[in-house]
Image (spheres, rainbow, N blue to C red):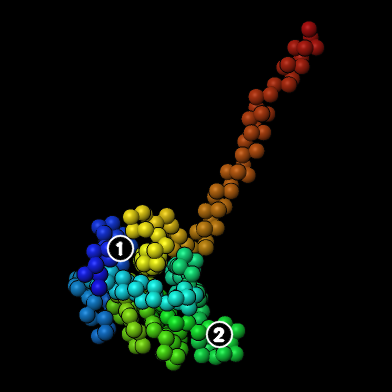
Amino acid sequence: MSGSVAALKPTEKDIQQLLACKTQMGTKNLSADMERYVSARRKDGIHILNLHMTWQKLMLAARMIVTIENPADVVVISARPFGQRAVLKYAQNTGATAMAGRFCPGSFTNQKQEKFTQPRLIIVTDPRTDFQAIRESAYVNVPIIAFCDTDSPLTHVDLAIPCNNRGRLSIGMLYWMLSREVLRMRSVISRAVEWDVKVDLFFYRDPEEVLKKEQEDAAPAVEAPKTVAAEFDETANWGDDGGADWAS
């Protein structure tokens, strides 16, 4: 895997970004299937995931994705709100098909369904919230890649990427790195050049905070004419100028 190919090894910046987004932070619960990916446990009970294994699984997932000839046959799914923006941006940059929000039952098994599709590979953000998509993919023998936390079930999951799948920054960072690696393996972008797409675009943004910021940015633009008019009224001295002219 990535240990044998120098180009697939993480850089110091990659590790710093993963640590900054707390990708290695798990939960207090630990399932038997995810025990192999845990490297330590803190005093407060939080399990710490092995970032080396996280990176290896991420590179292996990218190698699986590039084997699909038609990028649209790869479906990325996220019912969790923190991952919906990330899957949409991933689909936009790699050409995959995004299913953000509630997964409609029968999308992979019922041909009469309006959203019926036949993917060749699916990527889920959380095996717990996206269990319906995993179950239907197992019925039709579709490989499954899943971002898994320490307490995630691995039933029907073919490739588990151990990570913090509950963090807003962690999910965005992992999808950004996965899309970057897929584009590199497809020779769309070069490894020698920094990818011009910022990771901030993959992060979840609270609609209320976005609306509040837009209102704050629009407020000075509305108050600007009033300020100019007030300054104009203060500088104008019509009575004195007019009295002096008539007196002369």
Cα gap from disc 1 to disc 2, whole angstroms: 36 Å
Instruction: Please give the name of the residue rendered at 60% of the width and 43% of the height, measured from the top-left corner.
Output: 221
Q: Are marks 1 and 2 in contact (CB under 8 Å)?
A: no
Q: Which residue is mark 1?
A: 18
Tell me where residue 143 appears, x and y as whole percent: 39, 84
Instruction: Please give the name of the residue rendered at 36% of the width and 54% of the height, measured from the top-left corner.
Output: 193
Tell me where residue 116 appears, x and y as whole percent: 55, 85
Quadrant showing the C terminus: top right
Helix, strand or loop at label 2? It is loop
Q: Hey, what amino acid is under mark 1?
A: Leu
Instruction: Please give the name of the residue rendered at 74% of the width and 20% of the height, measured from the top-left corner.
Output: 239
Q: Earlier in the sequence, mark 1 or mark 2?
A: 1
Quadrant showing the N terminus: bottom left
Residue 129 visible (yes or no): no
Considering every residue shown, the one lying at the far top of the view is 248
2 lies above or below 230: below
Q: Tally the marks.
A: 2
User: 3 left or right of 101?
Assistant: left
Tell me where residue 124 appears, x and y as whole percent: 41, 78
Q: Which residue is more in the foreground, 142 or 153?
A: 142
Which circle marks residue 116 in the picture? 2
Which circle marks residue 208 in the picture? none
Q: Residues within 10 Å of mark 1 (few under 14, many from 20)?
A: many
